[in-house]
Amino acid sequence: MKVSLNWLGEYIDLPTSDVTELTNIFANLGHEVEGVEVLEPQFRDVVIGKVLTVQPHPDADKVRLCSVDTGNGPTDIICGAWNFEAGATVPVAVPGAVLGEDFLITKRDIRGVTSNGMICSAKELGLGDDADGIMVLADDLPIGTPFVDHIELPDVVFDLAITPNRPDAMSMVGLARELAAHFEITYRVPSPELGVTAGEMDLRVDIEDDRCRRFVAREVRGVEVRSAPLWMAQRLVKAGVRSISNIVDISNYVMLELGQPTHAFDRDKVADGHIVVRAATEGETLVTLDGVQRQLTPEDLLVADIERGSSLAGTMGGLDSEVSESTTNVLIECASWDPPTVMRMSRRHGLRSEASARFERGVDPNLPPLAADRMAEMIAAHAGGFIVAGMVDNYPVPIEPHRLRLAVSEVHRILGIPLSKSEVAGLLARLNFAVSADGKGDDDIDVAVPTNRPDVTRPIDLIEEVARLHGFDNFPSRVPTGGNGGLSVEQMRLRSLRWVARGAGFSEAHTSTFSSHADLAMLGLPLDDYRSQTIEVKNPLRDEESIMRTTLIPGLLGSARFNLAHGADSVALFETGKVFFNQESPELGTVPDQPDVFSFVAVGSSGPGDVAGLGRPVDVFRGMALWRSIVDQMGLGSSEIRQAELPGLHPGRGARVVLDGASIGQIGELHPAVARAFDLTGRVLVGELDLNPLVADPGLLSFVEPSVFPPSEFDLSFDVGLTTPAAALLSEASNAGGDLVESVEVFDEFLRGDAKAIGLRVTIRASDRTLTADDVADVRTRVIRAVTDKTGAKLRGG
Amino acid sequence: MDELQQIAQGAPALIGAAQSLEELKAVETELLGKNSVIAQKRRGLGALDPADRPTVGAKINEVFTAIQANLSDRQRQLEIIEENALLVGDRVDVTVPHVRSQFGTQHILTTVMDEVSDIFVSLGYRVAAGPEIETAWYNFDALNTPSSHPARAESDTLYVDFGDPADEMLLRTQTSPVQARYMQQHEPPVHVVVPGRVFRSDSLDATHSPVFHQVEGLVVDTDITFADLKGTLEYFARTFFGAGRVIKLIPHFFPFTEPSAEMHVSCFACDGSGCRVCSNSGWIELMGCGMVDPNVFEAVGYDPSKVSGFAFGMGVERLAMVRHGITHIKHFFENDLRVLGQFV
């Protein structure tokens, strides 16, 4: 809401005009100032003039010779505009005047005739963009007076952000009321003087729908539609509203002044003098003021005559019943509408107007009679005609002030400041709440809430008002602390997990939660894959964001591609985040299953590079190394890598990851076709693991006394089948060796044609003695037997 | 002067003249080796008169020991000289990064969320999380946001197709539904902070993204007042943006708090005198906050006549953009290594 300080002065005598001070006061009242415009006149020495005669120039046909009275008798001025005739009142820049920064007006000779000044357009005066003709002013402006006196400059315009709960503050009077409460001074509400009225209202209004809470109508007959007076047009312009005509401008002016939107109909276009407020019928149409034909439904509320709709209630008028240049009789509508109805209508039809913005927040239902009188008064004053006696006021269920009882102890309990009962009552009274605090010396204050405050319905709302007017700046500070806070084990371990991934050279990423079916198709996932059980976004912003992600991999691949495209030669990223599956959450019910996963991708090279920055090219083993780091650093239980052919992955370079017997995800290289689909070349490592088992509390670790006896180690080399995993040899060897086995490692792998050999290094140690040659031979025999029996391997040279 | 004396006198010069361990070895052989004068004298001891043997033997040993000591001193010297010579040859340019380290970086959003959480953890709060696909009841109704509220429109909120349509499943627009769930599961007192991802139907521009992050806080107890809210936010502002920061609270409107306020902090870059960071206002708008509305307490089963509380919520991207001067919200989601590498 744009507020001109000069205009505001009509309703309140402010003790200050300091912009910074007023900005702070508005903010502390809850009306944040989003901008301040300081307006200065863009001219000097422009006066009101009267055009006495207009004659052709003797020697030029594009301009005319005018005789103008600027207060000192007739003087000649040449003018190139044609939008006026003798009798017009106009702004005249007399010799010595300055327009804009430095355009000095002097006496000039124009083709043999002396021009003693210039008649000005709005644009030349810095008052708008209208340069088509000169400004033609209202005839009652005193000739010779300074033009600046009639446009209220200089001025300051505050742009206030009024919160949606405060329709009462969306008006000049409402803001005067707020400032009056702050300064503890009085403010003025217009009290219209209708003067002589004539005739009698001959209008019937039927309210057939209870979404209309009140309908007030007045009539002014014999008006002349012309431009609005200069001061009014200028006030509207400062408020950001275009000046159209006296009737339309007055309607807007009253809305901005009082906060009550009004509508002016051409009375002669209301059939049979009978207005019906009703729901639209299915399929009914109405052409609104903007020329658009609107398709209506019973959700829409119409002001209609008995033949057809005249306007969309509270939202926009109809084209047919609009006030036009030929209108002579005006019907004023001041109504009160159900706020949600107006909100839905304005949204459905894309019609957000100053009127709907007020109605959807809730306009005081007791305001229409004042607004109707004010409008009638102003029309009679600025458009002529006479006010028809009487007012139609259809108000089925009058709204009374809401009564509340506020306990002062509640004010203390919520605000923590020791305001006395009379202080609380005093603050509320300043805001125009009717308070009665003398009741029996008890704790309670009885409050009647003015009907312009729909936001105040409960004692807590009164407490808010008390806090607001007391001033948030005036509250003390205190810091409460909790007793038993802290991060959970899982939260701390999540931080550790991120640390491990960073230590392995992966940088943390955040990718979008949205995905698309195209992404999943590129990943090569079959329809029965668990990641194909997607949830659709009903109103996605873009096609690429039409489903909730079931895997983080496409997002991470997109980020990898972004980096390669921007010059990186290696990328290693990880992310922890939610994925979403089309099944109910096992923990929460109702909402979908949305577990967290830990995912990573890498392309290029990996590990510490050499001086040229070249590390080992990325392949599946980097993923396995990361997994080993996680198992070791996070103290996880027994883990296993199970080689497998998995959707989207290289058939020979992928694996399931098993932790404590349960599959928790997969690690592998992308299938080359999938990599190509994502515009990536070379080997692409991807991995995705359930997060919860990684960060779950592993319980207390128990100490194992290190043996003081020396270890023994021996190497074994086996010929194995090409598809026999080394992991099988390791686990058999480990099991067969029993308690003495300290570690079994693969120390070599030979591949020759379709032959494969695996070398194992077995380290054994006892906790209670030095091992003998017999101990070593015994373990060696058991390991060889177990490995050869269970995996089909053959001991080389055995 | 007998032969032995001559050798004893000449040995230091001979040993000192050895310029390498190899030369020294030759000198040692010459002085003490099998064919040396000293060795010959030792062998000749047996031929001497038994009465002279101890004196002559002692003399030989004395010379032998002195030469040996001299030799080993010289050996140590030469070893140091030779090693030094080796080290000179072993010199490298240590400014050439022959081995590159490859530590990954932490995302700035995670850093800020952890940092904010930790500030409140230090005050005894717990950290809570909850679902991102949420029911309209938890996201709106429980938070006193009626079904007619414009924030619930499809132009503001993203909805998903799941389960019973009556449940109105949506992408949470704030982390506040976690507060509602937390209160349902815990009796007061509550001190909790909720970092997490939230969603709005906003197209991407410099400061808006359909996906962004918030941290919200909630405190509920029998004696929580507006003064506690003010003090807590002051503590946060000073811990996060530095000592000397002041805050101002400006009345505002949110459905779930009453009274409600917007919290502004004095600009950390210019100390309030006005600069680019604060758009010359001296203040940075940081978060919304207020006293928990009684309707919220009723929705989660708390008695609003017995407990009171405050809540606040801030945008993580905004915090990071303001504090680090990040120019566009896209930088948080592109995962450009040149951006990620600027924060650790």
Image (tube, coloured by chain):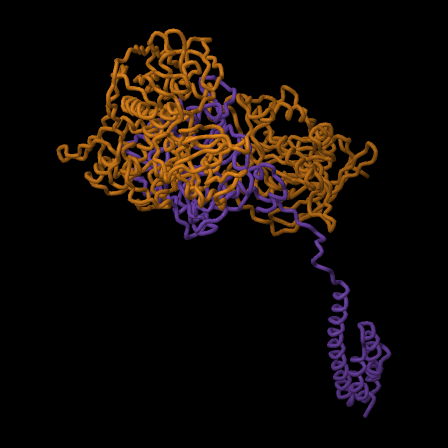
Residue placed furthest toward the left? A440
Residue A153 is at least partly visible in this image: yes
Q: Which chain is orange?
A: A
- Picture quarter containing residue B305? top left
Q: Position of residue B164 (x, y in %)?
A: 47, 17
> Which quadrant is the C terminus of chain A positioned in?
top right
Letter of the chain in purple: B
The residue that appears at 63% across and 46% down in the rendered structure is: B103
Q: Is B201 or B240 nearer to us in this picture?
A: B201
Q: Image point 46% across, 14% down: which residue?
A: A287
Identify the image quadrant of residue A542: top right
- Is residue A93 or residue A627 the one in the foreground? A93
Q: Position of residue A343 (x, y in %)?
A: 41, 22
> Is residue B301 something one can see in this rendering?
no
Give A243 or A583, whichever is nearer the viewer: A243
Percent of width and height locating residue B100 = 68, 50
Q: Residue furthest right?
A: B35
Is residue B85 placed above or below A401 in the rendered structure? below
Eyeballing the image, is B19 above or below A424? below
